[in-house]
Amino acid sequence: MGREDVLAWVESPLQLIGAAEWAAAHATTVPVAGRLTPQISATADELLARGARFGELEPYLGIPWSLLSRHGHWLVGDGFSGQFRLAAAVLRPHRITFLDDGAHAIAYADTLLGHRPYHRPTVEERGITTLVAPFAAELIHRRAADRRAGMFTAFDLGAARQDALADRGFGIRRHDFSWTRASAPAAPELGPRIVLGSALPVDGRMLLVDYVRWVRDAAADGAVYLPHRRETIEQLDAVATVPTVRVHATGLPVELVLAGARGPLDVHTLRSSTTTTLPLVLEGIGATIHTGRVRRSSPKAAA
């Protein structure tokens, strides 16, 4: 294993964009182990077309043990992942850099500080990955003490949190999607109003009837709807019934779809990582991000 040979281990399109930003910021070619999904494949193809500094891209299912064992510096997309914790406890990488996994970046920073348990928020865990969590945490903190662990993030962790991490040896580097903006071709003409799809109904955190009502309100004067990668056919069919909506499915993260926008945009979204990422991606074009609230129907109304 090369002690400083770098490998990006990613499980979502946003994590893959983070790897492209890291490679550009460090002027380094990065091989990628990407979870085998259509969204990862489509995002990888698009990033390569835009000049991402990726080396060999290896799709995988489960834990890419062979690739991980040959690289000493892991760019980890999901620090909460049970598979990461197991692999880290067994292989003990020389250096670890955590990329963004959506809005979990702040929760993970708090986990590194010992302010919350080492598991994904709102998820109850069992099994071997839970048992190895203390061993993975011990490894991470040992690497931080040797100045060999850190975060590469677009999220503002807050001065107190960042100072506390630095005191423990973690290196924190912010990025603002500068490579994503610089490499973007002109965005397709979608019109001035965009509604971003959400997986809240899929996750059981919002009734579909409430979601469609939100879409209808956001698109009252007409809008293009960009689906979330995890939306179901049922949800998309329900959205398509809104007469003022035009569904525009690209299979790509919204950060890539909109990065080349040139004119002002009104973007409507429910609370998610996009409330952090899009203001950075759309900086300087006069975009306005409207964050909607979840309006819940009463049980009688939803019945």
Image: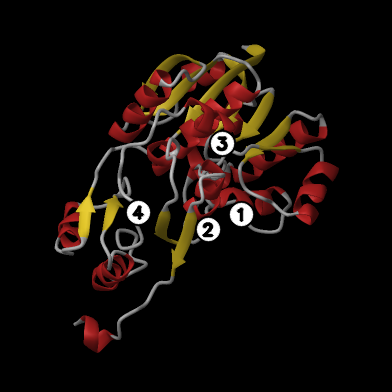
Tag 4 near tag 3, CB within 8 Å: no
Eye-nearest disc, 1 or 3: 3
Q: In this view, does 228 lie to the left or right of 98?
A: left
Tag 1 near tag 3, CB within 8 Å: no
* Disc with the residue nearer the chain's start (1 vs 2): 1
SS state under label 1: helix
Eye-nearest disc, 2 or 4: 4
Tag 1 near tag 2, CB within 8 Å: yes
Eye-nearest disc, 1 or 2: 1
What is the three-letter code of the residue carrying label 3? Phe
Q: Is residue 234 visible?
A: yes
- Residue pointed to by mark 1: 107
Numbered label tally: 4
Q: Residue at x 61, y 43 (%)?
A: 154
Q: Which mark is residue 249?
A: none
Tag 2 near tag 3, CB within 8 Å: no
Tag 2 near tag 4, CB within 8 Å: no
Calculate the distance from the C-alpha at mark 1 to the C-alpha at mark 3: 21 Å
How far across and how far down the image is residue 44, in percent?
Answer: 39, 25
SS state under label 3: loop
